[in-house]
Amino acid sequence: MNKDKLNFLVGLFIFTGILYVVHYSIFYNFFSEITLYIPIWSIYCFNSVVVLVVYSIIKNKTKKESKKGYKAFLLLTFIKMILAIVFLLPLFSGKSTNTKTEVINFFIPYFFFLTFEILAINKLLKSQ
C-alpha cells in the first residue's frame, strides 16, 4: 500500500470517527425519544465504504491514464447517488415512522463525506 492511500485511509478513519461521535452525541442528547429504523452506525459504514471504493477506483484509473479520472468520478458519483436511494428504500416504502428525520440523518453525513471525497480526489488529481 502506498503512502497516498495510507494517508487517505487514516484521514477517512479519523474523519468518520469524529463525525460519528458528534452526530451520535447530538442525536441522542436532543432526539433520544425518536427510534431510528436505520441506525447511525450503518449510515457511517455505508458512506465510508462507498467513499473508499470511489477513491480506490479513481486512484487506479489515474495511474493508467489521467484523463479517465474525471470521467470515472462523474460516473461513480452517479452510481453513489443510486446506491444512496437503494440504501434509503426501506424508508420510502413506509417502514419508518420518522421518515423525515431518517432522511436528514442520512443526507447530512452523506454531504460531509461527499465533500471529503471531492477534496481528496481533487488533491489526487492535482498531484498526477
Image (cartoon, rainbow, N blue to C red):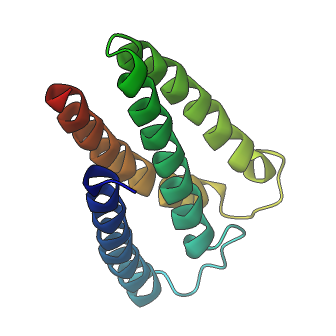
**Residue occupying the point 62% across, 42% down:** 84
In the foreground, 94 or 9: 9
Q: Can you tell which quarter of the image residue 80 is in?
A: top right
x then y, percent, for residue 33: 58, 86
x then y, percent, for residue 79: 61, 28
Q: Is residue 88 visible?
A: no
**Residue occupying the point 50% across, 34% down:** 57
**Residue occupying the point 74% across, 64% down:** 97
Counting the numbered discs, the total is 0
**Residue occupying the point 33% across, 61% down:** 6
x then y, percent, for residue 60: 45, 32
Q: Can you tell which quarter of the image residue 34 is in?
A: bottom right
x then y, percent, for residue 91: 74, 52
Side (left or right) of 56 relative to 122: right
Q: Is residue 76 visible?
A: yes
Q: Quadrant of the C terminus?
A: top left
Side (left or right) of 84 relative to 63: right
In the foreground, 97 or 1: 1
In the foreground, 39 or 15: 15
Q: Quadrant of the N terminus?
A: bottom left
